[in-house]
Structure formats: C-alpha cells, structure tokens
Image (cartoon, rainbow, N blue to C red):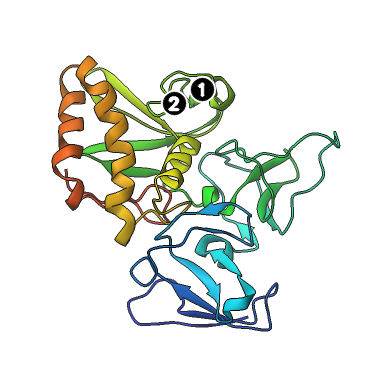
Amino acid sequence: MKVKSEKDTRAPAEICGYPFHAAHKLKLVTAAADDAEKFVCDGCQERGGAGSARYTCDEAACDFDLHTSCALAPDVLPEHALFKGRAFVLLHEPPPTEDSGERRVCDACGDEVRGFVYHCFDRDLDLHPCCAHLPGRVALGGAAFELAGGRKAPRRCLLCRGEGSRHLRRKYWTYSSDDFDGEVVHLHVACVKKMAYESSSAGCSHWTGGGGDRNMQVIRDSVQAVAPQRNGRFKLFGAKLESNTGNIHYAILSDDDARLSG
C-alpha cells in the first residue's frame, strides 16, 4: 500500500493499493471540502457524521468510505494507558463470541462491534479503531477532562443525565472533570458520539477543524440544561460554552490533545 502526502498534512492525501479496495485510489476528503454527507465507514461499520474527514474512493459508483483511523490503523495497537500490559491486534471482522447469540461490543464505548476491531486475545477485549485512539486529555470550556475507564468510570453522565443508559454504560469510558468547585462532570464517550451524529456533527474520531463549532453545540446545550440548577464554576463553564463557541475547536475523539481557548 502506497500513500501520497501533502505538505503540512498529517494524514496522506491519497492511499493506493488499500488491501480491501485495491482497484482504486482512496482520496482524503476533509470537512472543508465536503461538509454535507453522513456516511458509514466500510471498515468499522460505524457511522460518520457530516463534515467528518474520511478516505473515499475516486470512483463515485463504489460508495467506499473509511474513517482515517480505520484507513491508517496499524496492525498492532501500541500499549493503551487504560489497558496496560494488554496486546491488541487489528482484525477485519469481529471474532466469534462463546454464545452464538451474543453481540460483541467495544470495551471503550459499549457500542456493538461490526467490522474492523482491535482485539486482545488474552482477555477477550475489543476496541473500535476510533475509540482506540482517543486522546487521554481534552480541554473544554476552560476545564480539563480526563479519559477514565474500568473501575474509575463514573456512573452518571451529563448527557444521558442518569437515565437507564447509565446502568448499561457505567463500566465504559468517559471524559470526566472535577474542576468545578466540587461539581464533577462526566461525559460518556458513547453518548457524545451519538448526540454528535444526530446533530449532523462530525462523527467518530474526527470532531475537529471545520466541524468543531457544530460539535460544541451538542455539549453546550446539555450543559445549559442543567447549569441553572448548579452553582459556582459549573455555571461559568456553561457561560463559556455559550459565549465562546465560535473560538472552541472541540477535539474529543481526535488523535491530538485538545488545546482550546477558555
């Protein structure tokens, strides 16, 4: 597989000879170039939102798209901070479960695994390629949010606000911050992905760049809904999201740490 790079671009502009679509070149389409269409990734089978950067086939009739995280996924995942000592390898379809009727889910977000997946054979763990590359720390509205999982994963999420889904997702990953004068904010990774997609925001691992302002609206609305009931810095956090949306590039689920204005 050969790639063609552009200056000042981290992802290659083109991929030639991709193993699962070798007949045609795959072209990097950025949010600025194509800000309209949602898609389903032909790698992980997860949805991608409008404005999301992706690789797409030059031949329009093919309708072949990949998240950049799937197109450029290494065969072996470097050690993950939340799964230290565990080895994950890239599989192009999920392995069978012990119970034929059981669904395999991502151990980061809790959503079903349908296609490309990083699998740990020793502990039977699975990660979507996009989830496997979540940044460990992001900044949002002047507050630092840390990625948490396993026993450290909280039970209550600002986005689902204590409804039934919190019981299903409580063991999965969240972004959490205790930087609110005693108030703690948790955001399920899965809840943020779902709301971003439904609001036509950029999905999966590409919530940055041109789609950042729209993505912030999702979080901002959720914060504003509960802020009147809270005191202190939590209200200030909501106010910052309200006034600075145009200046904030929300990079949760990207390959980079977020460095955002607050």
Q: Secondary structure at mark 1?
A: helix
Residue 205 horizontal/vertical position (percent): 46, 54
Residue 228 at what x, y percent from top left? 20, 19
The dot on residue 16 is none
Q: Secondary structure at mark 2?
A: loop
- Is the C terminus in the top left, top right, bottom left or bottom right quadrant? top left
- Residue at x 15% of width, y 45% of height: 244
Above or below, comparing residue 217 to residue 186 in the picture: below
Residue situated in front as seen by the camera: 87 or 38? 38
Question: Mark 1 to mark 2: distance in Å?
Answer: 7 Å
Where's residue 145, x and y in %?
33, 36
The residue that appears at 57% across and 67% down in the rendered structure is: 65
Count of numbered circles on the image: 2
Q: Give the crowd class for mark 2: few <14, some 14-19, many >=20 residues within 10 Å.
A: some
Residue at coordinates 46% horizontally, 43% vertically from top-left? 193
10 Å crowding of disc 1: few (<14), some (14-19), many (20+): some
Type of amino acid under label 1 = Arg
The dot on residue 160 is 2
Is residue 2 rendered to the left or right of residue 96? left
Contact, mark 1 vs mark 2 (Cβ under 8 Å): yes
Residue at horizontal 42 percent and vertical 25 percent from the top: 157
In the rendered view, would you say 145 is above or below 235?
below
Res. 76 image quadrant: bottom right
Query: Which residue lies under the disc numbered 1?
Result: 166
| Quadrant of the snapshot with the N terminus | bottom right
Given this view, does label 1 or label 2 mark the residue nearer the observer?
2
Amino acid tagged 2: Cys
Q: Could you tell me if residue 250 is visible in this image?
A: no
Q: Quadrant of residue 175?
A: top left
Marked residue nearer the N-terminal end (1 or 2): 2
Please, is residue 50 above or below residue 71 in the view?
above
